[in-house]
Amino acid sequence: MDGDGAAAARHVSAEGNGMIIGMTLHVLAAVIWVGGMFFAHMVLRPSAGPLEPAVRLSLWSRVFPRFFFWVFSIRPVGVKRFSASALLAGLMFLAGPRFSSG
């Protein structure tokens, strides 16, 4: 490759790697969030139903901080701001030059 072509290839490769990392972190965050909500609603809620209200409240107040620790621990990585619309906009931006007629 010539000098300009090699530089362009490295630039596209770097953008693609960043997108892969961002997409992976986004999916990981979604799995943690949806899995935690599934567990809370489908497993913990029915299991805690027979407990006395005071005990049930104590249980929930001990479970949710542990869950939200995992949810908010992803935040420093930047996944919180890496929304699906940003992913789609980035994918469309990356796909644009490949499919142009120029």
Image: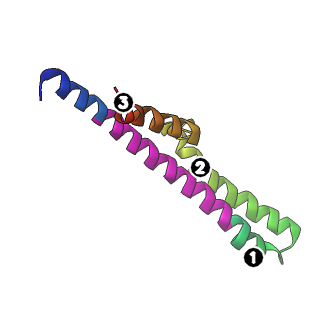
* Tag in front: 3 or 2: 3
Q: Residues within 10 Å of mark 3 (few under 14, many from 20)?
A: few
**Disc marking residue 47:** 1
**Disc marking residue 71:** 2
Element type at mark 2: helix
Q: Decide which of 46, 28 is in the foreground and name it.
A: 28
- Asked if the residues shown at circle 2 and circle 1 are in contact, with their CB atoms under 8 angstroms apart, the answer is no
Q: Left or right: 30 with respect to 55?
A: left
Q: Decide which of 19, 33 is in the foreground and name it.
A: 19
Q: Position of residue 97 (x, y in %)?
A: 37, 30
What amino acid is at disc 1?
Ser
Q: Left or right: 60 with respect to 68?
A: right
* Tag in front: 1 or 3: 3
Q: Residues within 10 Å of mark 2 (few under 14, many from 20)?
A: some
Q: Which residues are magenta?
A: 13-39
- Quarter assignment of residue 95: top left
Q: Position of residue 28 (x, y in %)?
A: 50, 53
Q: Position of residue 70 (x, y in %)?
A: 56, 52
Label 3 – label 2 distance at C-alpha: 43 Å
- The residue at the point 34 percent across, 39 percent down is 16
What amino acid is at disc 2?
Val
The answer to which of marks 2 and 1 sits earlier in the sequence is: 1
**Disc marking residue 101:** 3
Q: How many numbered discs sit on the rendered protein?
A: 3
Label 1 – label 3 distance at C-alpha: 60 Å
Quarter holding the C terminus is: top left
Q: Residue furthest front?
A: 101
What amino acid is at disc 3?
Ser
Q: Decide which of 77, 49 is in the foreground and name it.
A: 77
